[in-house]
Image (cartoon, rainbow, N blue to C red):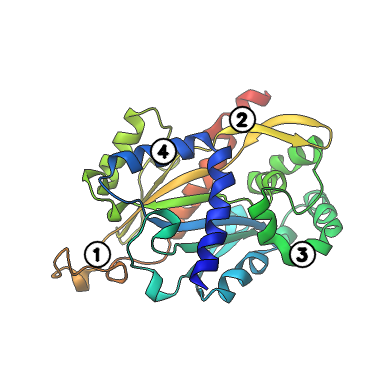
Amino acid sequence: MPLIARKFLRSLVTPYLKKNVTASSALELVRSNSGGAVKFDHFAFRTFGVDGFGIDSIAQLFLDLGYECRDELRFPAKKLRAFWYAPPLDFLDIEGDGVDGPLPRIFISELLVNQLSSESQEVIKTYTGRARALLKHAPLTSVLDCLPWENPSVADYERLAQESEYAAWTLANGYALNHLTISVHRLNSELKDINKLNEFLQSNGIKLNKDGGILKVSPDRGLLQSSTVADLVPCTFSDGEIETPASYIEFAQRLVLPAFQNLGPDQLKEWHRRDGFEVGNADKIFESTSSLQTGALKQSA
């Protein structure tokens, strides 16, 4: 099973790096200056919570590969919920680089479509309704870098963007990898300190998400996160082409839990560190694709 998981993850990463120049550049900068292998903390997807196209449509593959469902997170203001999935424990803390290293956690969010306006619901349900034959193959569309539904119109994209930029992003990008996350504390250089990593990235021209501050810190101060701002890339719609936000890359540092502070560096394992996710951090990380961060508002004005 792990071999299948690695091949699937590799198939996700290939189109992601090809499409997202900033994410690819940031990854290469870290890789070339980290003093060793780069390991991934988690991969994230966005979905529509309607017509069976929500979290379960992506999660089932990972569950079949041995992942376990963990906590639910709620984002009322954004009308979102999410679950995260832990890889088999035997593959959480092993050697290797990238997708050949520890299996990443999986974070899947979904838009609570029924909480949107009737107009936005109608747009989303029109596309998902016509794509029901592909309902069980959402992960395949992620690998093939294509939409599970027909190309939307610019008007429908812009209509959704007025109410929910998450909805507009998902309509345009489908279930493409929304972001992957570098495990900062696993780096083998001074960059294993996320503050130094953020400074390093910015000094090399990488634009970071400033919503809530560049560094996002959980209330228990055990989970530290930052992310790049998504690139604007040409997106083909049924009636034209415009630039829309694509994906981004995230950085996460998980600190050692208080109960294990007495362990030496050679004794520490990933499960000795702060696990899971934090609503406040994730809420700000979502903004990596927002128009205010990417400049899409100014471009369309």
Type of amino acid at the residue the image marks with label 1: Val
The numbered mark, 3 or 1, whose residue comes first in the sequence reads 3
Q: Which mark is residue 294?
A: none
- The residues tagged by marks 3 and 1 sit, at their Cα atoms, a distance apart of 40 Å
Instruction: Mark 2 vs mark 3: give the one in front.
Output: 3
Depth check, mark 2 against mark 4: the one in front is 4
Numbered circles on residues, count:
4
Q: Dot 1, crowdedness within 10 Å: few (<14), some or many (≥20)?
A: many
Which amino acid lies under the numbered mark 4 shown in the image of this protein? Ala
Q: Which mark is residue 135?
A: 3
Q: Label 2 vs label 4: CA separation?
A: 21 Å
Q: CA distance from mark 3 to mark 4?
A: 34 Å
Would you say 30 lies left or right of 81 here?
A: left
Say which residue label 2 marks: 296
User: Separation of disc 1 and disc 4 at Cα?
Assistant: 26 Å
Residue 48 x/y as whole percent: 70, 58
Image quarter of the C terminus = top right
Q: Residue at x 35, y 45 (%)?
A: 215
* Picture layout, residue 167 above or below residue 66: above
Residue 79, image x, y percentages: 63, 57
Marks 1, 4: nearer the viewer: 4
Residues at marks 2 and 4 touching, judged by CB atoms closer than 8 Å:
no
Labelled disc at residue 26? 4
The percent position of residue 41, horizontal first and vertical second, equals 41, 58
Residue sitting at x 59%, y 45%: 15
> Of the residues under marks 3 and 4, which one precedes in the sequence?
4
Residue at mark 1: 256
Q: CA distance from mark 1 to mark 2?
A: 39 Å
Q: Which of pointers 1 and 2 lies earlier in the amino acid sequence? A: 1
Q: Residues within 10 Å of mark 2 (few under 14, many from 20)?
A: some
Query: Which mark sits nearer the N-terminus, 2 or 4?
Result: 4
